[in-house]
Amino acid sequence: MIQKTPAEIVLIKKACEITRDALIYAKTLVKEGVSTYELDKSIEKFIIDSGGSPACLGYEGYPAATCISVNDMVVHGIPSKDIVLQKGDIVSIDIVVAYKGYHGDAARTYPVGEISAEKEKLVKVTKECFFKGIENLRIGDRLGKLSHAIQTHAESNGFSVVRELSGHGIGRRMHEAPSVLNYGKETDGPAISENAVLAIEPMINAGKKEIGMLSDGWGIVTRDGKPSAHYENTVLFTRNGLEILTLEKDDEYYSR
């Protein structure tokens, strides 16, 4: 597990601050009638105006600044003028910001107006999965402790966990070792080391766990057409506990 230096942590924290603020801004834009293309362009401008750069843009050929996934799309939705938000949708916005060579990564799933009880529960439980995962997680614990807690909470609520996608280490590169699975045994995975930085991101399906890829080579959707939700934060592990670097300060969980 890659340990970060104090100087690196300063830059990662700044990248995460811009990421967090970009998501706060994005939430204000989520409305019926707005295209995902419009959302992407507005968020891209916000990131640049804040002193960062959108790390997704151009990454392995990805054509947009953000990933915006609606309803049954799990992740990696390419923003489009043809995808217009409708009342009752849920939309996942995944943002990665680069700042002076270091990265912050976070995602949220937002409702578009009033949503169904199933979608409301899915969004709520997906967020809870993140916090169940990090609960009492300390340096020296196996990553499997987090993975098992996420899986247990999702499945106990009647949902399923995507297997093919995972969280990851983050820092100078957007994706670093180790992979942070959302399922598995408590004894699995490497031990968490001091000053490790991880992007932890439950991706939870309302129906079955199976997924498929769109013909664009990016969008990942549920095979059964049921909705999916995504919740992600970048987390720093220190000897005094963990810091959630991309969490909104007014979030109900912030002071926990």
Image: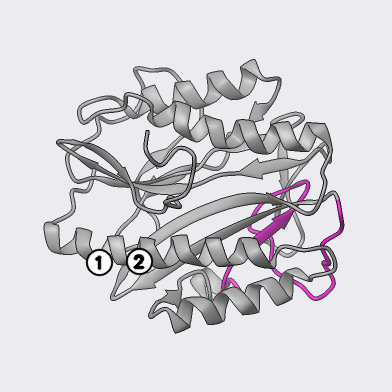
Q: Given the image, on which type of amino acid does mark 1 rest?
A: Leu
Q: Secondary structure at mark 2?
A: helix
Q: Is residue 193 above or below residue 64?
A: above
What span is in magenta? 62-87
Of residues 13 and 194, which is closer to you in this image? Answer: 13
Residue 233 shown left or right of residue 210 in the figure: left
Looking at the rendering, in which quadrant would you find the C terminus? top left
Residue 178 shown left or right of residue 250 in the figure: left
Q: Is residue 78 magenta?
A: yes
Residue 242 shown left or right of residue 151 in the figure: left
Q: CA distance from mark 2 to mark 1?
A: 6 Å
Q: Could you tell me which residue is drawn at 82 percent across and 62 percent down?
A: 85
Secondary structure predominantly adopted by residues drawn in magenta: loop
Q: Residue 67: horizontal and vertical position, in percent?
A: 62, 63
Please indicate, yes or no, whether residue 122 appears anywhere in the rendered image. yes
Contact (Cβ within 8 Å) of mark 2 with mark 1? yes
Residue bearing mark 1? 11
Q: Is residue 218 magenta?
A: no
Checking the image for residue 193, the label placed there is: none
Q: Is residue 17 above or below residue 144?
A: below
Residue bearing mark 2? 15
Q: Secondary structure at mark 1?
A: helix
Q: Given the image, on which type of amino acid does mark 2 rest?
A: Ala
Q: Could you tell me which residue is drawn at 67 percent across and 61 percent down?
A: 68
Q: Could you tell me which residue is drawn at 61 percent across and 24 percent down?
A: 154
Q: Residue 40: horizontal and vertical position, in percent?
A: 64, 73
Please indicate, yes or no, whether residue 218 appears anywhere in the rendered image. no
Q: Residues within 10 Å of mark 2 (few under 14, many from 20)?
A: many
